[in-house]
Amino acid sequence: MRAFDSDNVEAQPQAAPGRLLGQEISNGADDLALLGVGDGAGCSPEVDPAALAYFNHREHIAIETHEIEFPGPAAKIARQHHEPLRLQMLGRPLLGGPAAFSRIRHPSKRAPGIAFMSRPPARAFVEKWRDSARIREMQPKHHHTPRGFRNNYIESVTKSLGDVLRWQLQRIRDRLPPPAAIPTPEAPADLDFIRRNAAAGAEMTPAVTWIGHATMLVQASGLCVLTDPIFSRRASPVQFAGPARAQEPGIAMGDLPHIDVVVISHNHYDHLDRASVKALASQAGGSPLYLVPLGVKRWLEGLGITRVVELDWWDGHSVAAGGGRPVEFRFTPAQHWSGRTLRDRNRTLWGGWAAMADDFHWFFTGDTGYSRDFADVRRRLGEFDLALIAVGACLPRWFMKDQHVDLEEAVQIHLDLGAKRSVGVHWGTFALADDPLDQPIHELPAVRSAKSVSEEAFFLLPIGGTRRLSRRGDRV
Ligand SMILES: [Zn+2]
């Protein structure tokens, strides 16, 4: 065993019985490494609750987790601070290589609490303690793999380079998408109502305003929330090329009420727009709270945005609205993928968001193919008063089916979720696929009637348009 590399992490260099070993891993050949929390008589008083919290929050890089049930003082400290003691096997590719390890630095040099091991001693440690029942195997997370995240119900949605080329050639040959027969409807935003409602606290009327694409202002339970904000002219890494918006945003950035929370579904350019999240972070009155999928926090921090909480599927975060009620946000699975460059495919997570307070439950699918994930959401979280469902960018089906639903599947998701009302988003703004921008307007009526869903129950808004909804328990 090599000596512990103190440049990478502060930890106990000498192993004692019952204590985790620290070993240098930064240039080892192992795929996996283990990050643990120290224990044993020698180091237990030094276990720092901040380190435990830090460590436990990093489950996203763990592909295997074991909860340790040591009887020692470290366990007592952990219990006092409601933090479990854990051993985690990490996927090196997810961490981004040795450089990432130097970022996992113990917050205080004086208080070691985290140690690294390479895979073989980590395995031996787990094997040794398994029989003694001091280690509880935690449910392995199916969607965490050493190479990135994956979907629940399909092996891969990723198309080969050949398929991408085939699609692009067909697009050029067939001049797709066809132009829209009618422009996406627009309505002047009712800014008076939106601002009054933003200030109403507990009396807030649940309301949604479509700003364009998947950007929706949801006002409910005392909070103003934006989904996947994009106000830029193009959904692209550069502003001189890439899909340009067909419509101005329904509310200009400067006319927005104070935004309390921004939820991000995944890191594609049409959902996580650099200029928009930066501008929102410097809104008057302070940055919104950004709720993001695992792995996206670091990217936002790189832009200087610090009010960020990143979550794994099914994890929750509660936000107390000023004068309103606590709103529980949950990040939920969807069938999609992530990536902003050729090298970061599926290295950050994707998904949908549920927001639940006693007066209103709403849900945003994010981008998704049709899957059983939405039946799972309903089973675990109950029914919703409103769902924002991504429609559009769905053709050709042979290329898009696994990652973007068509209208029929979108209405099926509405039924799967048990949503009282649903609104289509992710259409009419950026031409991202072979369907014309106005396709949902023309096709929705027939799809609704085929599934016996009313016009009230699954609707589209004009850009800038607001729909007010009833609170739970209110007489409809
Ligand atoms: Zn996407």
Image (tube, rainbow, N blue to C red):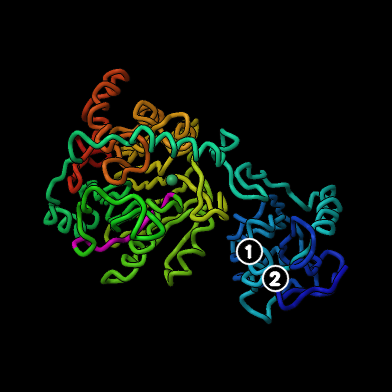
For residue 113, the mark is 2
Q: Is residue 206 visible?
A: no
- Spatial CA distance of label 2 from label 1 is 9 Å
In what element is the residue under mark 1? Answer: helix
- Give above or below for 311 relative to 181: below
Residue 423 locus on image (x, y percent)? 28, 37
Q: Which image quarter: residue 59?
A: bottom right
Q: Main secondary structure of the magenta part?
A: loop
Residue 319 locus on image (x, y percent)? 38, 58
State the quadrant of the N terminus: bottom right
Residue 86 locus on image (x, y percent)? 69, 58
Please state if 383 lies on the left or on the right of 18 as rendered. Answer: left
State the quadrant of the C terminus: top left
Give the camera-side residue of 237 and 63: 237
Is disc 1 surrounded by few (<14), some (14 to 19) or many (20+) residues within 10 Å?
many
Q: Is residue 109 visible?
A: yes
Magenta range: 255-265
Residue at 63 percent across and 56 percent down: it is: 94
Mark 1 CB near ligand 1 (8 Å cut): no
In what element is the residue under mark 2? Answer: loop
Residue at 57 percent across and 33 percent down: it is: 154
Give the camera-side residue of 179 and 455: 179
Residue sitting farthest toward the front: 173
Q: How many marks?
A: 2
Q: Quadrant of ligand 1?
A: top left
For disc 1, the marked residue is 55
Give the camera-side residue of 40 and 38: 38
Could you tell me the amino acid type at mark 1? Phe
> Tag 1 or tag 2, which sits nearer the N-term?
1
Residue 235 locus on image (x, y percent)? 35, 53
